Amino acid sequence: MSAVPLPRTPSFRLDGRRALVTGAGRGIGGAMAAALAEAGAAVTLAARSSDEIASVAEAIRRAGGQAEAAALDVSDLAAVSRFFTDRPAFHVLINNAGTNRPKPMTEVSEADYDAVLGLNVKSAFFVAQACVQKMLVEKVSGGSLIHIGSQMGHVGGPNRSLYCASKWALEGMSKSFALDLAPHGIRSNTIAPTFIETPMTKPFFEDTAFKQSVLDKIKLGRIGQVEDLMGAAVFLASDASSLMTGTSLVVDGGWTAE
């Protein structure tokens, strides 16, 4: 009897690919940079805080990965343009820089609106645009844009009107990017996490009532950790997800299931 040829699992490896992670100095961004480097990518970590990204990049190199730190304020669109002009094209972008100002909608100021929508939507848009323009010039094939959204881009939440507005916008933006870029072989997807414990969110969980309200919604019964997102990032960056575009990986422990 002749052997039946078995299909081969597409590779999750990223060897030979260049990846950019914004907001990479700590938390989710730092973890995703580490994950891509572990999978073989040469990773550029970008953030305003040069000390933090330098520290993470050094840790990645000590672990055997390839990483460089690049100070960049993604809200400075002229700086963003120069950043991409001065470098070869990336194959992978993790659009992670973002902010939040939780408060009731009756208390939101124009400055709050501009801060959250400006960074979470405007900066994300123009970072992606500049990254793609360089991809097209250098004819990069198999490019992957990964935008860090939120479960709050799929549902609403109290005191999250600005954050929800920005993350719902990010979902629509990514879907439209996917349609524009499919003819060029460039994909666009989001990762939508639940509450993840990071240096930024940890103080909120010191409020026991707030922490319990979060745990009541996360059906798996625990706060997310950055490690919960690392596999999703590698998957969307790699050939293993080559038919995925214009969609969202919701990593929420069951929050949005009801």
Image (spheres, rainbow, N blue to C red):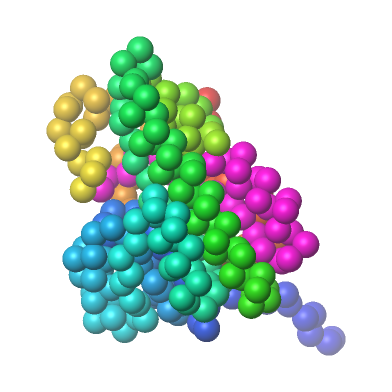
For residue 207, say whether it is visible: yes
Magenta stretch contains residue 36: no
Q: Could you say which is closer to the camera, residue 245 or residue 77?
A: 77
Give the left or right position of residue 73, taking residue 7 as reference: left
Residue found 31% across the figure and 16% down from its top: 107
Give the left or right position of residue 57, taking residue 136 as reference: left
Q: Which residues are magenta?
A: 170-198
The image quadrant where one finds the N terminus is bottom right
For residue 228, say whether it is visible: no
Q: Position of residue 72 (x, y in %)?
A: 34, 62
Q: Could you say which is closer to the camera, residue 237 or residue 84?
A: 84
As drawn, the residue found furthest toward the right would be: 1
Q: Position of residue 245 (x, y in %)?
A: 66, 54
Residue found 30% across the figure and 40% down from its top: 223
Magenta stretch contains residue 181: yes
Figure check: 157 above or below 35? above
Residue found 74% across the figure and 59% down from its top: 182
Q: Could you say which is closer to the camera, residue 223 or residue 243?
A: 243
Figure check: 40 above or below 200? below
Residue found 33% across the figure and 22% down from its top: 109
Give the left or right position of residue 110, taking residue 50 as reference: right
As drawn, the residue found furthest toward the bottom would be: 2
Q: Position of residue 154 (x, y in %)?
A: 53, 32
The quadrant holding residue 197 is top left
Figure check: 99 above or below 52? above
